[in-house]
């Protein structure tokens, strides 16, 4: 079986690692890895490949920075000849970034079966680029692999036949479980002068939270307010840093003694900080899942989530993007003793194996 796996952004790399490992073990599965170059910062790409043990991509498109529409067009133009040059039985795309949609569209236009890993997630908010990417990718896909039961329900509601969907679990958690002990042995917490259970971890990067002066101001109030309640580590995404610099909020962050603004981190260092945190405040979808697997309280600084199982499971609360409301929820979490929970169904480290075995069975048939 010849598969082409297309990646381009940090969440893709984490999920790709969970697919490549079982593919290697099968012996009769060859995987060609294509990196679109959507994330072009070395810390967001090269270091993650090293941390995750990913091989050097077979093809690097080198698309680089551009507005999403420009990136999508460049990826489609670059992928067409690459897909035509070598036999593949299916193109596998993961997640919901621009590279995901580009891979699905390019394969579908070339008549190549498309497999979407992490299918069926929906926030109900079409103003989010990721939501449109998810919907369009799912409707271009032939094989849809889901991480939670609600995703199967979403696909059925959109008219996708159940025989094209497989509930396999969460491939991101495969990678987390595989690397957790390695991350724990690193001196990451000591490097930043914190101890397990004694700090908050915060990540904010979505356009709704940083792309306007008002949104950036609210984010600064959130992060500084969080640091007033608990020592806080804030690994800052490059685009968040650029927006806060442009809107004048960055000096207010660096002036707070209990707040450390960190550079972008590799996978293992970030996992170590995530695993040791007392609570996490984020607008990231993947981090909602990782905190659920780790049993770490998470507050999602958004109006919605495409990962409802993290909420129903009891580890995550969607708090909106009013910083005062969010900080009241922080105080509620800090007032309650930690109560770790077991992970959701099939978040057991074998989701990637289920994907590969299902694809091998379906493509042989």
Image: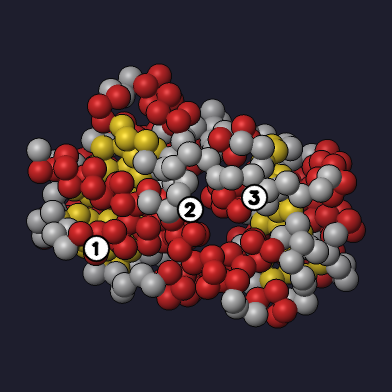
Badge 2 is on which residue?
173
**Looking at the image, which residue is at 40% across and 19% down?**
157
Residue 32 image offset from top left, x and y in percent? 22, 62
Numbered disc 2: secondary structure: helix
Residue 190 visible in the displayed image: yes
Query: Could you tell which of marks 1 and 3 lies nearer the N-terminus?
Result: 1
Mark 3 is surrounded, within 10 Å at the Cα level, by few (under 14), some (14 to 19) or many (20 or more) other residues, namely many
**Looking at the image, which residue is at 37% across and 62% down?**
17
Numbered disc 3: secondary structure: loop
Gap between marks 1 and 3, in whole Å? 30 Å
Gap between marks 3 and 2, in whole Å? 12 Å
Residue 326 image offset from top left, x and y in percent? 80, 42
Badge 3 is on which residue?
295
Residue 212 image offset from top left, x and y in percent? 70, 48
The front one of 30 and 324 is: 30
The front one of 344 and 193 is: 344
Give the quarter of the image for residue 322. Answer: top right
Badge 1 is on which residue?
25
Q: Is residue 126 left or right of residue 187?
A: left
**Looking at the image, which residue is at 24% across and 43% down?**
358
Residue 277 image offset from top left, x and y in percent? 72, 60
Residue 244 visible in the displayed image: no
Numbered disc 1: secondary structure: helix
Query: Could you tell which of marks 3 and 2 lies nearer the N-terminus?
Result: 2
């Amino acid at each position: 079986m010849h598969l082409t796996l297309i990646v381009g952004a940090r969440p893709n790399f984490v999920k790709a690692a969970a697919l490549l490992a079982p593919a290697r073990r099968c012996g009769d599965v060859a995987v060609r890895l294509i990196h679109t170059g959507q994330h072009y910062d070395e810390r967001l790409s090269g270091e993650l490949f090293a941390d995750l043990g990913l091989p050097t991509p077979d093809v690097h498109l080198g698309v680089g920075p551009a507005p999403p529409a420009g990136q999508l067009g460049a990826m489609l133009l670059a992928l067409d000849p690459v897909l035509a040059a070598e036999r593949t039985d299916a193109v596998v795309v993961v997640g919901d970034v621009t590279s995901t949609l580009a891979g699905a569209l390019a394969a579908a236009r070339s008549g190549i079966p498309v497999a979407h890993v992490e299918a069926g997630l929906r926030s109900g908010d079409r103003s989010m680029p990721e939501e449109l990417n998810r919907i369009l990718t799912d409707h271009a896909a032939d094989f849809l692999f889901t991480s939670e039961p609600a995703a199967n329900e979403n696909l059925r509601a959109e008219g996708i036949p159940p025989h094209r969907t497989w509930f396999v679990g969460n491939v991101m958690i495969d990678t987390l479980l595989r690397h957790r002990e390695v991350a724990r042995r690193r001196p990451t917490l000591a490097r930043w002068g914190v101890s397990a259970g004694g700090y908050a971890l915060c990540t904010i990067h979505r356009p709704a939270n940083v792309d306007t002066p008002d949104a950036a101001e609210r984010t600064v109030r959130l992060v500084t307010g969080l640091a007033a309640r608990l020592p806080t580590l804030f690994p800052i995404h490059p685009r968040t840093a650029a927006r806060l610099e442009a809107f004048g909020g960055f000096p207010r962050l660096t002036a707070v003694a209990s707040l450390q603004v960190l550079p972008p981190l590799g996978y293992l260092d970030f996992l170590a900080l995530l695993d040791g945190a007392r609570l996490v405040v984020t607008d990231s979808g993947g981090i909602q899942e990782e905190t659920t697997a780790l049993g770490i309280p998470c507050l999602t600084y958004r109006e919605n989530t495409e990962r409802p199982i993290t909420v129903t499971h009891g580890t995550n609360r969607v708090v909106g993007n009013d910083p005062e409301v969010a900080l009241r929820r922080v105080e509620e979490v800090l007032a309650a003793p930690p109560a770790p929970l077991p992970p959701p169904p099939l978040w057991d480290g074998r989701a990637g194996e289920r994907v590969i075995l299902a694809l091998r069975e379906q493509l042989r048939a």
